[in-house]
Amino acid sequence: MKKINCDIIKDVLPLYLDGVVSNATKDMVEEHLRCCDSCRKEVEILKQDIIIPTTKNIQLSEARIFKKLKVHFWKKNVFVFVSTMIATILLIIGLHSYAILTETCIPYDDEIIRIDETDGKLYATYQEENLGGTVSLVPSKVTINGKEKNITVFYYYETPWSKYIQPFWGKDDFKNTFYLGDKDDIDQIYYGEFELDGSEINYANIAGNSKLIWGD
């Protein structure tokens, strides 16, 4: 058989190694390889796979990277969880504070708010169930229309808690009846909302903005 030029063999070696040549070409290449050291070495070179280095140092480096990523995502998940819990707690505290501390004066209605006298003592009674609490002033002497009067002022209030939530838990803990003072010490009782900001209480001004519900 006529010797085939090595350049031709080297040109078809990739196809030969991929197994896509004809049987005749395959036989030709194999015949040539049996007697040609140069082409056999070329075959060995082509057969070598491209291997990604996997040295111990690289493997350790990869392990450290994955460990750091794992720790990072764990910390992130913990942070999200803790942040969500804190936000939820703050929201609950905020809603609870709003429900408890937001006071709204209950308008006077003589069908549900009455003044009673028992053994010379005066009591105010609220006859509904949505009571949040009571704010009152101790009796004090005030000049009204040129006359001195011993007066007291009070009002009932409700909160979102007492109006919407407390009914699901049963009757509230506030006493619907409370003591205003002795009858001999009070000439007039007023009902109306007022602010207690720590400054001196202006009874006359508060009385002027309130409703007289007992006395003359």
Image (cartoon, rainbow, N blue to C red):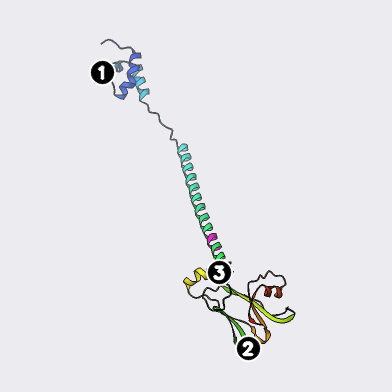
Q: Name the residue located 32 percent from the left edge and 18 percent from the top edge.
A: 12
Is 81 drawn above or below residue 193 in the view shown? above
Kind of element beneath mark 1: helix
Q: Quadrant of the C terminus?
A: bottom right
Q: Label 3 sits on what residue type?
A: Thr
Image-based side of 187 in relation to 28, left or right? right
Kindly report which numbered mark, 3 or 1, lies closer to the viewer in this rendering.
3
Q: How would you rate the neighbour count of disc 1 (Cα within 10 Å): few for under 14, some for 14-19, many for 20 or more?
A: few
Read off the residue under disc 3.
159
In percent of width and height, residue 166 lies at 50, 71
| Res. 120 mark | 2
Q: How would you rate the neighbour count of disc 2 (Cα within 10 Å): few for under 14, some for 14-19, many for 20 or more?
A: few
Image-based side of 187 in relation to 80, left or right? right
Q: Earlier in the sequence, mark 2 or mark 1?
A: 1
In three-dimensional space, the C-alpha distance between marks 2 and 1, rounded to whole angstroms, equals 131 Å
Read off the residue under disc 1.
27
In three-dimensional space, the C-alpha distance between marks 3 and 2, rounded to whole angstroms, equals 32 Å
Is 55 drawn above or below residue 174 in the view shown? above
Kind of element beneath mark 2: loop
Question: Which stretch did the figure color magenta?
Answer: 89-93
Kind of element beneath mark 3: loop
Q: Earlier in the sequence, mark 3 or mark 2?
A: 2
Magenta region includes residue 75? no
Answer whether labels 2 and 1 touch (C-beta < 8 Å): no
As drawn, the residue found furthest toward the left would be 23
* Quarter of image, res 153: bottom right
